[in-house]
């Protein structure tokens, strides 16, 4: 018992008599913590960081482009008016930041699309699947756009939108009408309903997977 008492007196806390630096009173400690945080943040970003991708979203007027954009961005349906000019938003999905440029589709605005082509990696072409009368016009605009040299490496995702309407054309019919099978580039058609969000993220899955493989 005496031995145990003797030994116990020799046990001391390793921190006894040690004063830990308080960050708020120690600028050097604050700086070291900040630098360590930046280093860890950079390391984490290299491993799991977001990739930036520039996406151009076009299509004829009233196809639902702006509804698509804000459904992806906000997760809700917003009241839209015909886009005069453009909307631009960043949509984060699966470690990819898609900078999406939604450009107006009215006939007088379409010639301005070319001003947005530079550095575009992917195109989202939105089609109103219920607007059968203007499918030829949609094909013409898509063909014209894809002849531009600045878009030679861009992949094409077609949103066959408004699939909830009873007389909407199916994905296969949209594919044939746009002549996509003759296209010499990577493309994909996804049936969507912008108001409910159906199909939108499946399309982004294809886009993110395809663009990641191209890097």
Image (spheres, grey):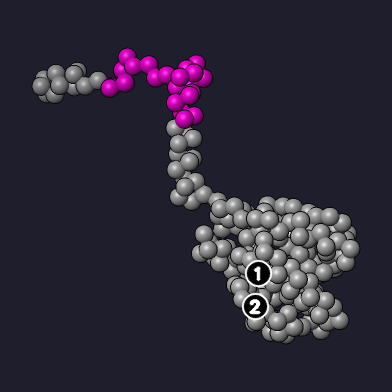
List the residue tagged with mark 2: 183
> Quick one: which residue is furthest to the top in this view?
17
Q: Residue at x 67, y 64 (%)?
A: 149
Magenta segment includes 14: yes
> In the rendered view of the protein, which quadrant contains the N terminus?
top left
The image quadrant of residue 10 is top left
Q: Which residue is drawn at 73% across and 62% down?
A: 57
The image quadrant of residue 146 is bottom right
- On the question of residue 75 being in view, the answer is no
Front residue of 108/211: it is 108
Q: In this view, does 155 lie to the left or right of 147?
A: left
Asked if 100 appears above or below 167 in the picture, the reply is above
How many C-alpha atoms fall within 10 Å of the one at disc 1: few (<14), some, or many (≥20)? many
Q: In this view, does 138 lie to the left or right of 208?
A: right
List the residue tagged with mark 1: 156
Q: In this view, does 27 lie to the left or right of 157?
A: left
Front residue of 31/121: it is 121
Secondary structure type for disc 1: strand
- On the question of residue 154 being in view, the answer is yes
* Contact (Cβ within 8 Å) of mark 2 with mark 1: yes
The disc at residue 127 is none
Front residue of 136/31: it is 136
Q: Where is residue 173 in the image (x, y as percent from the top left)?
A: 72, 85
Secondary structure type for disc 2: loop
Magenta region: 13-35
> Distance from label 2 to label 1 (Cα)?
10 Å
Front residue of 89/7: it is 89
């Amino acid at each position: 018992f005496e031995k145990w008492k003797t030994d116990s007196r020799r046990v001391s806390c390793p921190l006894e008599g040690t004063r830990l630096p308080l960050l708020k009173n120690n600028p050097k400690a604050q700086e070291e913590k900040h630098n360590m945080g930046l280093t860890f943040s950079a390391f984490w970003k290299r491993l799991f960081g977001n990739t930036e991708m520039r996406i151009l979203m076009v299509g004829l007027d009233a196809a639902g482009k702006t509804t698509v954009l804000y459904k992806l961005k906000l997760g809700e349906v917003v009241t839209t008016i015909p886009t005069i000019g453009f909307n631009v938003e960043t949509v984060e999905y699966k470690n990819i930041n898609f900078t999406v440029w939604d450009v107006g589709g009215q006939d007088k605005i379409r010639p301005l699309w070319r001003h947005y082509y530079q550095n575009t990696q992917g195109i989202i072409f939105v089609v109103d699947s219920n607007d059968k009368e203007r499918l030829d016009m949609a094909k013409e605009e898509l063909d014209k756009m894809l002849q531009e040299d600045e878009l030679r490496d861009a992949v094409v995702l077609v949103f066959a939108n408004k699939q909830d309407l009873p007389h909407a054309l199916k994905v296969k019919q949209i594919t044939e009408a746009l002549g996509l099978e003759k296209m010499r580039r990577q493309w994909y058609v996804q049936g969507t309903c912008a108001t409910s969000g159906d199909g939108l993220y499946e399309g982004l899955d294809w886009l993110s997977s395809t663009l990641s493989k191209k890097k």
